[in-house]
Amino acid sequence: MLSKFQRLAHGLDRLSELSGRAVAWVVVLMALVVGYDVAMRYLFSIGSVALQELEWHLFALIFLLGAAYTLKQGGHVRVEVLYQHFSPRAQAWADLFGTIFFLLPFCLLIIISSWPFVFNAFQYAEGSPDPGGLPYRFLLKSAIPLGFSLLVLQGFAHIIRCILFLLGKEKGTA
């Protein structure tokens, strides 16, 4: 039977899996948009500001909404040269320390500092300043606190897994 903490970590993992699946489709969409844009530009000399903006909007969504899934999969940044030589227990301690003292404070800083930025964008219904650009830029900006909030939630799941591993109640921390 799973403990409450294991169920919580599992639920947070499922949320990251869902965001990862959504991001996978955004990657496919971005590849199609970039392919279309390149073909139109180089074959027919037709360019579009809106299409170029859509490309970087999609890239931003991939980065922001895919970070939690990347953490869940163990693809986050760490000093592998040292980490790979640690015992599993030392790796769990390193992950726990790094998540509590680096990941969570950084994410909270971004979430808190992005609120005025996002609020102003919504307040003015910010769109592209470029002629022919995309409207509704404020929606894209709201992905900043959303993406980092998802990362915080996955960070909590990671902390739970590390603690359970260190207590001998779970096999792995990744």
Image (tube, rainbow, N blue to C red):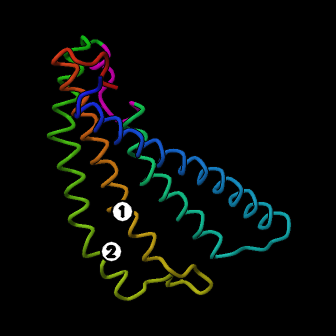
43 or 123: which is nearer to us? 123
State left or right for residue 66 relative to residue 117.
Answer: right
Predominant secondary structure in magenta?
Answer: loop
Q: Position of residue 67 (x, y in %)?
A: 40, 46
Tell me if residue 82 is in the magenta stretch. Answer: yes
| Amino acid type shown at disc 2 | Val
14 or 136: which is nearer to us? 14
Q: Position of residue 29 (x, y in %)?
A: 65, 56
Residue that badge 2 annotates: 118
Q: Position of residue 77 (x, y in %)?
A: 34, 35
What residue is at 69 percent from the left and 61 percent from the top? 33
The residue stretch that appears in magenta: 74-84
Q: Quadrant of the N terminus?
A: top left
Q: CA distance from mark 2 to mark 1?
A: 8 Å
Q: Are marks 2 and 1 in contact (CB under 8 Å)?
A: yes
Residue 47 against residue 13 in the figure, above or below: below
- When asked about the image quadrant of residue 16, the answer is top left
Residue that badge 1 annotates: 144
